[in-house]
Image (cartoon, grey):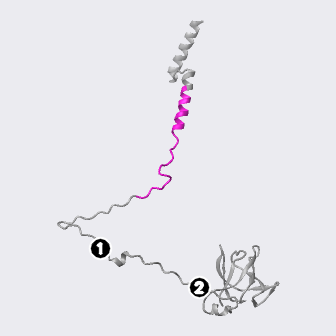
Amino acid sequence: MAARKRSKARKRSKARKKSGARKTTRRKVARKKKGARKKKASRKKAAPRGGGRRKTAAKKKTTTRKTAGKPPAAPAARPAAAVARVPAAVPAPRPATAPGAPAAAGVAAGIPVEVGRVTHYYSHVNAAIVALSAGELRVGDMVHFRGHTTDFYQRIDHMEVDHKPVPSARAGQVIGLQVSQRVRENDAVLKVAR
């Protein structure tokens, strides 16, 4: 029986030598697997040091030309006036129009005047409902729609009150306008010029 085992083992070893495979026992295979796991765990990337700061670009070195027989020139001294910082100019506030003041004075001066607010927008027909709060709007006036994400100019070509076309509308009326872009509720409607 022992002779048979030996002859089988010799045949296996000869076959392994031909195929180039090594003789391994179960213990060695188990050790190899454990070692492989440890290696994979150790190969994980380490967290970047420095608290996640980005690397800054290295400063460029300035090269100076060597001139024959001349010493390098000293940098010119800056005048004291150039070193002192000048405070930034604060823009003047826009003159606010009183609620009772006529809107035509602001428009004539070139200052946009708020005449109303968008109360609703119908996306399927690109129409806006505007509640007029001050002044007057007429067909042909240039208006500016301004809001959180809205900012465009448009000339009024057609306006309606109660589904009927009208040439002009005054404060207190609710009008419908065809708009070229999307507007949102509570966007301001400013009259710019006629």
Place residue 139 in its image quadrant.
Answer: bottom right
In which quadrant is the N terminus drawn? top right
In the foreground, 149 or 21? 149
Question: Of the residues shown, which amino acid type is indicated by label 1?
Answer: Ala
- Residue 35 among those drawn in magenta: yes
- Residue appearing at x 63%, y 90% in the figure: 106
Q: Identify whether 146 is placed above or below 33.
A: below
Place residue 115 in its image quadrant.
Answer: bottom right
- Residue 91 among those drawn in magenta: no
Q: Position of residue 42 (x, y in %)?
A: 51, 37
- Look at the image and give the residue range highlighted in magenta: 31-57
Tally of marks = 2
- Residue appearing at x 25%, y 69% in the figure: 74
* Residue receiving disc 2: 94
Q: Is residue 177 left or right of residue 31?
A: right
- Residue appearing at x 76%, y 73% in the figure: 124
Q: Position of residue 129 (x, y in %)?
A: 76, 80
> What secondary structure is found at the residue carrying circle 1?
loop
- Residue appearing at x 66%, y 76% in the figure: 147
Question: Of the residues shown, which amino acid type is indicated by label 2?
Answer: Arg
Residue 77 disc label: 1
- Label 1, residues with CA under 10 Å away: few <14, some 14-19, many ≥20: few
Q: Position of residue 149 (x, y in %)?
A: 65, 73
Q: Is residue 41 left or right of residue 183?
A: left
